[in-house]
Each structure stands twice: as C-alpha cells, then as structure tokens.
Amino acid sequence: MKLEKLREVLEQKQIVIYFGAVIVAALVAMSVSGTTAVESAINPALAFMLFVTFLQVPLAELGQALKHVRFLATLLLANFVIIPILVFALVEFFLEDQMLCFGVMLVLLAPCIDYVVTFAHLGRADARLLLASTPVLLIAQMLILPLYLSLMLGEDVASYIQAGPFMHAFVWLIAVPLLMAGALQFFAKRSNSGRHLSDILGLTPVPATALVLFIVILAVLPQLGPAIDAVWKVLPIYIAYAILAPIIGWWVARQAKLDSPSSRSVAFSSATRNSLVVLPLALAVPGAIPVLPAIIVAQTLVELISELLYVRVIAKWGK
C-alpha cells in the first residue's frame, strides 16, 4: 500500500520533478565544464527508462483493448490518419530544413504510451481504457512511423536512417527493454518475488524519465549553440500542435459517438507524444547531436506545460 501511495505521489508531481531535473541540469551545465562527457550515459539511462516504462504497459492485456472496437478504431484513426495530416501540414508550412522535418515528424507522429495515462486520469478521461490500448499504440507506431517518414521525406530519409546504427538503437533501446518488460510481467503473475520486483520498479518511471532529461540537458546544453536557431524554428509547430491536436482528437471521438470520458482519452492521446521513446532512434542518426535531441526535448517541455492546461480544460469538455 505504501508503494502504491508513493507511486501516486510521484505521478501527480511528475511535471514538477521533470522541470526540476531540467533546471538543475541547466545550472550544472552552465557552471561546470566538461558535462558533455555524460553523453555516453544517455543510452543506458534511456534503456532503463524504456524498460520501466514498458513494464507499466499491460502487454498481456492486448486482447482486452481489442474488445473495445469503436474506441480502438477511433484512437487509431485520430493518431495514425488525422494527426499525421496535421503534422504534415505544419511541417510543410513552417519548415524547409530536412533534418528539422525529420526530427519534428519523428516525435509528433508517435503517440505517447506512458505518462499520457496519468494525465488522462487527472483530466477525467477513461484512463483504464487508454491504458489497455497502449500496446496497440506501441506496435502501430513502430510499424507505421518508418512508412510516414519515407512518404514525407522520400529518398532523403535514407540519409538520416542508416540501417546499422538505427537497428542497433531499435534492438537494444526498444526491442530488448520491451521483451524484458514482457518477461517480468509474465514472471510477476506467477511469482511473489516477481510481483514484488515489479511493484518496486513501478516506482521508477518518473525518476528514470527525470534522469534521462537531466543527462540529455547536461550533454546537449554546452553544444546548444548550433541548435538554438533550430529550436526557435520548431517551437511554433509544437505550440500549434499543442493547441490543435486535442481539439482534433476530441472532434474525431465525438463523430464516432464515444462517451465523454472516452472522448477525453482520445483528446489526450492525440495531444501527447512519445518524445523520449523515439529519442534513441534520433540519436542513431549521424550528426544528430545537438540538433535532434534539442528539438525533441523542446517538444517535451512544451508538452509538459500544455498538460498542465489539458488536465483543467479537457476535463470540462462534454460535461
């Protein structure tokens, strides 16, 4: 019970924790030389974060999500048909640089599978239904994301995704943590020790995410000079997306005649992206640092600020 209470506190305070990690990291990076050396710690921290994140995704309950056909179809329609149209339009309007296009699309085309559930719950959405759907969202984005990137960037995408580093990042930072999480979930259902270990690790997603943000800021901030212009160029896209995406998600859900809590879930899912999950894929791109990490973390910060508004505004929709 104490573990559950602590986990609840961590989840409720996660925005404060994340911004605290970013501010402390920025202060350290500006006052201590040589913090770029922590760059080698990014991948191990990401691997652990993704493992404990995937551990919270009910992989064994994939079948449960498939029972809610209308909700799942609406969720997939919003995230993989309507939202990509919005992203393509924003990128086409605001950006010309192909590297920036790649980074923005990489993050905005991938729906969140972790903290969106917490924010959805705080915003009076059907968080349990959204949680049950997260395995489908994860599988769908891993399959569809390369197709959308190729469709939008054409042959240029090949220069950003080199098979070797990209596959290495996917295998060790996404596939292996996902398989380990699935194995521990299986073990936890059959063993008290496995369940206890799973409960303890259930406390770590928020601290692990804060640690990743801390390390990324330490590594990237001293190199940020060439990336400042890039961040300013993508900020209008992120702000426009943060405003339009939840409205679009809500509209799609209401057209599908979902009830208000389910519609709020689609709105939250449409607005919340998988930035830190796709970060290892961005880091596998040759010459990615500092531009790609900078614009991905920028999206995370805009999103976290937006979530503070969502949990108040979206909660009132459909009253």
Image (cartoon, rainbow, N blue to C red):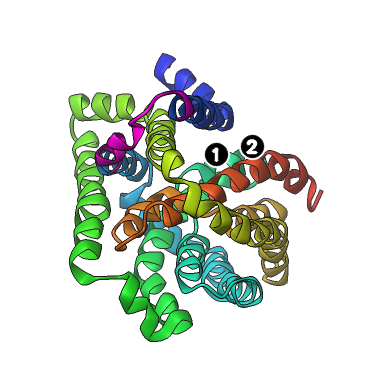
The residue closer to the viewer here, 45 or 202, is 45
Q: Is residue 157 above or below residue 302?
A: below
Range shown magenta: 30-42
Q: Secondary structure at mark 1?
A: helix
Q: Secondary structure at mark 2?
A: helix
Residue denoted by label 2: 122
- Quarter of the image that includes the N terminus: top left
Residue 72 x %, y %: 51, 65
In the image, taking residue 53 as reference, residue 246 lies left or right, namely right
Query: Label 1: how many residues lie within 10 Å, few (<14), some (14-19) or many (20+)?
Result: some
**Residue sitting at x 53%, y 44%:** 117
Residue 228 x %, y %: 55, 51
Query: Label 2: how many residues lie within 10 Å, few (<14), some (14-19) or many (20+)?
Result: some
* Image marks 2 and 1: residues in contact by CB distance under 8 Å: yes
**Residue sitting at x 20%, y 30%:** 194
Residue 64 in which image quadrant: bottom left
Q: Is residue 302 above or below residue 210?
A: below
- Please name the amino acid that badge 2 sits on: Leu
| Residue 113 visible (yes or no) | no
Residue at the farthest top position: 2
Residue denoted by label 1: 118
